[in-house]
Image (cartoon, rainbow, N blue to C red):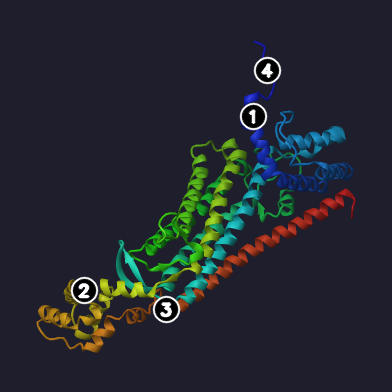
């Protein structure tokens, strides 16, 4: 049977090739240009191409770059994709020499290299925003170190703490997430160039030189893994998903804390929208946007990871162009979450009156009364717990603050211990005071001022370490770009 059809099929062209062309033009063309230049410099330096041929190709690449209107380019089907369009331009201007640039390389190693270049810039941007949020949290936590809050467990008032202590807990998780994202950038810093299709090349290529010119820390060693391993994708999107999950839990707390019935967190007017029909309602809708943006980011991360599931361990389109482009939406949503939360949290404040009322109504300092009885009255904790429980039930039933429940306490103590308490009225008042409760918890990680100050110093060190790590990578890439430009311009004969 004779096949008279020609490539590309119109439907395949419109549904696959044209969108891919637009995606490469938008997201990867600049990276492909850098790869072309770095590879050309290496071919000449290793003697694979003559200096004369290399100069002709370099000048033509520069002419194409200067004279080609990328934005106006549309997919016609004449060339399979952006790569072949550039190669066709080279061959149209240089003849057969235009095809020499592709010596010792493949679309496989090129694709994964430009994907990594596109991802590393987005990952660095997300990390920088996480560090900015971490610094905002730390600054806010320092300023709220002594601000009392009601800490909840199982949705119920539990114990007094401070807003600074709560924010520090959040910050600890964020810093752990930032460290994971920082670690996930490491595989992006390993160049696949030189792997060619699968097995490297019979030409005496210098993989390290290309990696250096493109700003990579080094090469990814195994050539098969360069084109088959997608751990740089799964690792990165896993690391991006985690802060969205973890910050989403904090957002849920903020929704709960701002509820009218709780009222612990006050959101300023600049971040509140009023109902169109109910003028009394203050709707802190940024919280809802934070929640769904974080969920969208996490969902897009899952989509990227799941797209790699059960794919063959080889080069395949499941990890390439269109999939890569789809993943950028995860970064777009995640960075909006990070920016909005960095503005939202510092603007909020704690409603001290509501905290005090809930503290009184829910007996949340009762744990310290039990501890005091163990220390000062020589009781076992179980005895002390029973006395504290009886005292709490009595004052809650009477709807009086715990600090006014000394009489109820004395009765409970006598009932359980079989003797009068030696604890004075003043000592009782101190034991059930919220600020005293916090001050006594002066252990590593506790809410007492000294404990928090020590934690703040540790968090500052971790933030600075993350900043320094990112700064080293960014400086290396900037210096590499300068080296590539210098080497390419030298090859063109302009130096």
Residue 44 shows in this picture: yes
Secondary element under disc 4, as helix, strand or loop, is loop
- Tally the marks: 4
Which residue appears at 16% of the width and 86% of the height?
421
Q: Quadrant of residue 438?
A: bottom left
Which residue appears at 55% of the width and 38% of the height?
313
Residue 30, horizontal then vertical, whole percent: 73, 47
Report the Cα–Cα distance between label 1 and label 4.
16 Å
Sort mark 4 into few (<14), some (14-19) or many (20+) by Cα contacts within 10 Å.
few
Residue 463 to residue 183: above or below: below
Q: Quadrant of the N terminus?
A: top right
Residue 5: which disc? 4
Front in this rendered view, residue 31 or 135: 135
Q: Quadrant of residue 79?
A: top right
Q: From the viewer's perspective, is 67 left or right of 284?
A: right
Which of label 4 and label 3 is nearer to you? 3
Which of label 2 and label 4 is nearer to you? 2
Q: Which residue, given by chain and number where applicable, does mark 3 sit on? A: 146
Report the Cα–Cα distance between label 2 and label 1.
72 Å
Q: Which residue, given by chain and number where applicable, does mark 1 sit on? A: 14
Front in this rendered view, residue 123 or 67: 67
Residues at badges 1 and 4 in contact (C-beta under 8 Å)?
A: no
Q: From the viewer's perspective, is 140 left or right of 429?
A: right
Sort mark 3 into few (<14), some (14-19) or many (20+) by Cα contacts within 10 Å.
many
Residue 66, horizontal then vertical, whole percent: 83, 45
């Amino acid at each position: 049977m004779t096949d008279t059809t020609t490539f590309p099929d119109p439907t395949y062209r419109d549904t696959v090739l044209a969108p891919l062309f637009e995606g490469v033009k938008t997201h990867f063309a600049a990276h492909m240009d850098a790869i072309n230049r770095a590879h050309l410099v290496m071919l000449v330096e290793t003697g694979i191409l003559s200096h004369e041929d290399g100069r002709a190709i370099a000048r033509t690449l520069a002419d194409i770059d200067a004279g080609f209107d990328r934005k106006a380019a549309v997919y016609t089907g004449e060339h399979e994709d952006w790569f072949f369009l550039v190669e066709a331009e080279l061959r149209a201007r240089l003849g057969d020499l235009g095809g020499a640039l592709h010596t010792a390389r493949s679309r496989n190693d090129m694709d994964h290299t430009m994907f990594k270049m596109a991802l590393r810039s987005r990952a660095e941007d997300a990390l920088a925003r996480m560090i900015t949020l971490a610094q905002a949290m730390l600054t806010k936590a320092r300023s709220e170190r002594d601000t009392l809050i009601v800490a909840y467990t199982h949705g119920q008032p539990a114990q007094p703490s401070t807003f600074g202590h709560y924010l520090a807990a959040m910050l600890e998780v964020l810093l752990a997430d930032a460290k994971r994202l920082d670690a996930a950038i490491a595989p992006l810093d390993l160049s696949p160039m030189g792997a060619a299709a699968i097995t490297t090349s019979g030409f005496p290529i210098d993989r390290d030189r290309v990696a250096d010119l493109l700003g990579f820390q080094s090469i990814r060693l195994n050539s098969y893994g360069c084109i088959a391993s997608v751990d740089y994708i799964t690792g990165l999107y896993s690391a991006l998903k985690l802060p969205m999950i973890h910050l989403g839990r904090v957002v849920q707390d903020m929704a709960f804390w701002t509820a009218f019935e709780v009222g612990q967190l006050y959101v300023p007017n600049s971040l509140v929208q009023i109902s169109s029909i109910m003028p009394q309602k203050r709707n802190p809708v940024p919280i809802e946007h934070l929640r769904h943006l974080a969920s969208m980011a996490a969902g897009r991360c899952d989509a990227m990871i799941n797209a790699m599931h059960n794919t063959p361990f080889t080069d395949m389109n499941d990890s390439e162009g269109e999939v890569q482009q789809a993943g950028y939406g995860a970064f777009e949503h995640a960075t909006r979450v990070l920016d909005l939360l960095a503005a939202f949290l510092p603007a909020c404040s704690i409603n001290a009156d509501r905290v005090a009322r809930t503290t009184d109504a829910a007996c949340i300092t009762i744990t310290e009364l039990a501890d005091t009885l163990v220390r000062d009255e020589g009781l076992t904790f179980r005895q002390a717990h029973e006395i504290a429980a009886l005292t709490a039930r009595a004052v809650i039933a009477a709807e009086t603050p715990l600090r006014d429940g000394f009489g109820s306490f004395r009765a409970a103590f006598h009932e359980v211990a079989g003797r009068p308490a030696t604890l004075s009225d003043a000592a009782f008042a101190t034991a059930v005071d919220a600020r005293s409760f916090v001050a006594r918890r002066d252990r590593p990680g506790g809410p007492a001022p000294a404990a928090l100050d020590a934690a703040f110093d540790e968090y500052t060190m971790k933030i600075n370490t993350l900043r320094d790590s990112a700064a080293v990578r960014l400086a290396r890439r900037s210096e590499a770009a300068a080296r590539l430009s210098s080497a390419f311009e030298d090859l063109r004969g302009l130096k």
